[in-house]
Image: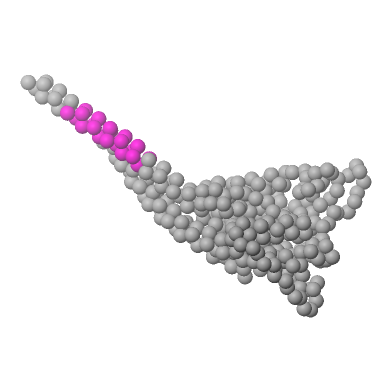
Amino acid sequence: MAGTKEIKRRIKSVKNTKKITKAMELVAASKMKRAVSSTLSSRLYAEYSWEILTSIAKNAEELNHPLFTERSGSPSQESKADQRKILLILVTSNRGLCGAYNAQIIKKAISLLSQKTVFGETSRKLSFEVDVITIGRKGDVAMRRLNQNVLASFSELPDNISLVDVTPISNLVINEYSLGKYDRVLVVYTDFVSALFQRANIKQILPINKADLKELIDSLEHTKSAETLLPQTKTNYLFEGDKVKLITTLAEKLTRMQIYQMLLESNASEQSSRMVAMKNASEASGEMIDDLTLVFNKARQSNITREISEISAGMASVS
């Protein structure tokens, strides 16, 4: 009977675990619904903001604003590698129990750190120094273990993140880049594709690439035309005041909006990964309970059979 008691304790323990994982699955599903709603809503806002930039994109070549300035770094001798300094923003979660969400994004960041080339500059050997801004405790721990220089760490952001919560991060990034401390600002985050699939991604947010800006505007207009199947009217904007100042304000808001959108994408991906992970854990617990119940019934049947055999043998010896 000692064997059956041990199995019963294991069944009870697994049932308690299943209750916890099921509750976490429901909580994650609720948070995921809210996060996905915010992500999709912000995508629409981003599209409309791009429409406003359409009228000024053609004049972007004339601007010398720091956020639009490509920095090639100081030239050096042929025997030496060109030097670059990159600011990397790593977006992870504060907690685990979300499947491979943190692992895949940290792996993406480590892959970037181990590269010998930077985006678009594979023709020359590059030596670049990387400073990191971490959003989430998991990324902060991983970067410190790799002895990376962590410039700042943000781990107290709320689940329902707003544009106001992003302001300290965006101000830090814009100020550091405008002062000329970094040549590029990259963000490693997770794109939300669906509840079952999220994709780790790396995106350059500074300097703002003028060609990519126009391509994205054109693609958004093309997509919108295809969806509505109606002729699109082009809006002409009349600007009053200092145009350079206006462009500067729009560029800063664009950068802030990009960071905000990436955080929303990552939040939706995190909650989706956690919901799927907890659902898989609940299903695995159910299968384990079934297996343990089968083992328990076999052990109990074996004990009963043995006791009957002992009683029969005792009666036979008496007679």
Q: Position of residue 268 (x, y in %)?
A: 55, 57
Q: Is residue 19 visible?
A: yes
Q: Residue at x 50, y 62 (%)?
A: 34
Tell whether 301 sits left or right of 11: left
Between 8 and 82, which is closer to the camera in this rendering? Answer: 82
Identity of the residue furthest to the front in this view? 231
Q: Residue at x 67, y 60 (%)?
A: 221
Identity of the residue furthest to the bottom in this view? 241
Between 220 and 166, which is closer to the camera in this rendering? Answer: 220
Identity of the residue furthest to the right in this view? 77
Q: Residue at x 40, y 52 (%)?
A: 22
Q: Main secondary structure of the magenta part?
A: helix
Query: Where 156 sits versus 146, above or below?
Result: below
Tell whether 145 sits left or right of 126: left
Q: Is residue 144 visible?
A: no
Q: Residue at x 46, y 56 (%)?
A: 29
Q: Position of residue 84 (x, y in %)?
A: 81, 52
Query: Where 302 sits versus 69, above or below?
Result: above
Between 67 and 213, which is closer to the camera in this rendering? Answer: 213
Identity of the residue furthest to the left in this view? 319
Between 276 and 84, which is closer to the camera in this rendering? Answer: 276
Label total for image: 0
Tell whether 121 sits left or right of 267: right
Quadrant (top left, top right, bottom left, bottom right) of the C terminus: top left
Magenta-drawn segment: 288-308
Q: Position of residue 316 (x, y in %)?
A: 11, 21
Query: Where 183 sits versus 107, above or below?
Result: below
- Residue 68, located in which quarter of the rendered image? bottom right
Q: Position of residue 105 (x, y in %)?
A: 62, 49
Residue 27, magenta (yes or no): no
